[in-house]
Image (cartoon, rainbow, N blue to C red):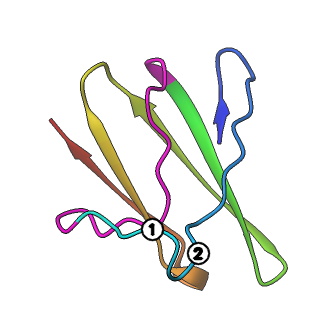
């Protein structure tokens, strides 16, 4: 994930299969919290191809970005 204003890069990895229990509502397998508001680009390398999505993070808002393999991303913005 890269902040498009500051060029700061945040690297993360998905949870291990049994390392962490996901939230019952979000059913997430990776979380990045406390990000400053602004524009971001998310990049996932999957089977030899880089998939990217852009989103804007607003203060006090949760963004849910789902990756669907070769079908790419879907984005939900929660207030």
Inter-mark Cα distance, 2 to 1: 7 Å
Residue 23 falls in which quadrant of the image? bottom left
* Magenta stretch encompasses residue 53: no
Residue located beneath label 2 in the image: 16
Question: What secondary structure characterizes most of the magenta part?
Answer: loop
Left or right: 54 with respect to 26? right
Looking at the image, residue 57 lies above or below residue 46: above
Tell me the quarter of the image containing the N terminus.
top right
- Stretch in magenta: 24-38
Left or right: 68 with respect to 52? left
> Where is residue 12 shown, x and y percent of the image?
66, 51
Q: Secondary structure under badge 2?
A: loop
Q: Secondary structure under badge 1?
A: loop
Please give the name of the residue rendered at 14% of the width and 35% of the height, measured from the top-left corner: 79
> Where is residue 46 shown, x and y percent of the image?
73, 77
User: Which residue occupies the foreground of this view, 79 or 28?
Assistant: 28
> Where is residue 10 shown, x and y percent of the image?
69, 37
Please give the name of the residue rendered at 66% of the width and 60% of the height, measured from the top-left corner: 13
> Where is residue 29 shown, x and y percent of the image?
46, 67
Q: Are marks 2 and 1 in contact (CB under 8 Å)?
A: yes
Please give the name of the residue rendered at 48% of the width and 26% of the height, measured from the top-left corner: 35
Q: Which mark is residue 11?
A: none
Residue located beneath label 1 in the image: 20
């Amino acid at each position: 994930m890269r902040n498009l204003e500051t060029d700061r890069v945040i690297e993360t990895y998905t949870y291990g299969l049994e390392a962490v229990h996901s939230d019952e509502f979000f059913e997430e397998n990776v979380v990045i919290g406390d990000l400053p508001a602004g524009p971001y680009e998310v990049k996932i390398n999957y089977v030899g191809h880089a998939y990217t999505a852009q989103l804007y993070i607003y203060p006090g808002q949760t963004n849910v970005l789902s990756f669907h393999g070769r079908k790419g991303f879907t984005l939900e913005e929660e207030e």
